[in-house]
Image (tube, rainbow, N blue to C red):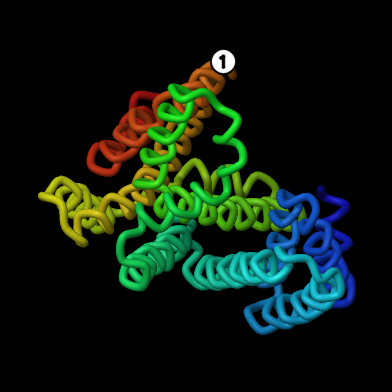
Amino acid sequence: MKALAAFIMRGQPQAIAVTAGFAVLSLFFPLLGLLSAAVTGLVTLRLGPMTGLIVLVAGSVVVSGVAMFMATPLAIPAIVSLLAWLLLVWIAAVVLRVTRSLALSITTVSVVGVLFVAVFHLIVGDTAAWWQSNFDEFFAQATESMMMDQQMVFKQNLETWSAIMTGFVTMAFLLNVIFSLFIARSWQAMLYNPGGFREEFHGLRFGKQVAIVSLVIASLALLPESVITYISKDILMLVLMLYVMQGIAMVHAIVGIKGLHWAWLVGLYLLVTLVPQLVAITGYIDTWLDFRKRVAKQG
């Protein structure tokens, strides 16, 4: 990764080539989009917003041309999502470069996600029904071969997913954006500030203003069924994402401060997989109690 980052920083042609190359490959292997967006983030962090924007636009033009040449039904949706991905990483990198606050850059990305959820609800209306109809069409052939009881269970599962799908898809997309930002920042640290990203991530902590807004959103999600309730439930998934990250950062920091065994981190990620709500609640409480500071004072 360090060699790749060094190659990217040799100049704009190299950065554009790597951005476009990984972007094209991401049409077949989506996770490579993380690296394509990370290149834009690295250039923006190190060389400034305009240079990053030039790399973003040039890389986007190349991959758009390749995608249109392929002329597949998924080409346009793939390009739109990729361009949104690159643009959000650029915005987050600009905020991080100016403020030097990882929490503020992630919050900025999350605000964009909140706006998307709200607009999607206002345009579509009943988002659960919209997802349900798409699921029914997509899985039509699969359900035909099932037994009656299996069909009922499968449709019940689809109904459950339909209710949370808007928030889930938005959260998944924003996680990709945030991971790309993390990769970009870690590349920058490897080249110019060894250990800097580790220290920055260990200090990740969202402010009390974000905590208060999050509490309001959680309260709105408990109200009787209405448009506000449905929107709040989807936004609540973004809140969960924020505080799971803070919980992870907190545990990583405490493990580092106390010199604990790496098995504690294995346990942490098991909790993230099985009960992310618990990690999120711990992260939220950390906003008010600052467990890292308390542990550091204890030596």
Mark 1 surroundings: few (<14), some (14-19) or many (≥20) residues within 10 A: few
Displayed quadrant of residue 149: top left
Residue at 82 percent of width and 50 percent of height: 2
Q: Position of residue 45 (x, y in %)?
A: 64, 68
Residue at 10 percent of width and 50 percent of height: 224
Q: Looking at the image, which is closer to me, 298 or 263?
A: 263
Q: Position of residue 234 (x, y in %)?
A: 33, 52
Q: Secondary structure at mark 1?
A: helix
Residue at 46 percent of width and 51 percent of height: 171
The vertical placement of 222 against 268, above or below, is below
Q: Looking at the image, which is closer to me, 40 or 217?
A: 217
| Whether residue 89 can be seen here | yes
Q: Position of residue 236 (x, y in %)?
A: 31, 49
In the rendered structure, the answer to whether residue 211 lies left or right of residue 85 reads left
The vertical placement of 31 against 56, above or below, is above
The residue type indicated by label 1 comes to Ala
Q: Looking at the image, which is closer to me, 246 or 221?
A: 221
Q: Position of residue 200 (x, y in %)?
A: 53, 49
Q: How many labels sit on residues?
A: 1
Q: Quadrant of the C terminus?
A: top left
Residue at 65 percent of width and 78 percent of height: 48
In the rendered structure, the answer to whether residue 244 lies left or right of residue 187 reads left
Displayed quadrant of residue 122: bottom left
Residue that extends furthest to the left in the rendered view of this protein = 224
| Whether residue 193 can be seen here | no
The residue singled out by tag 1 in the image is 263
Displayed quadrant of residue 222: top left
The vertical placement of 68 against 228, above or below, is below
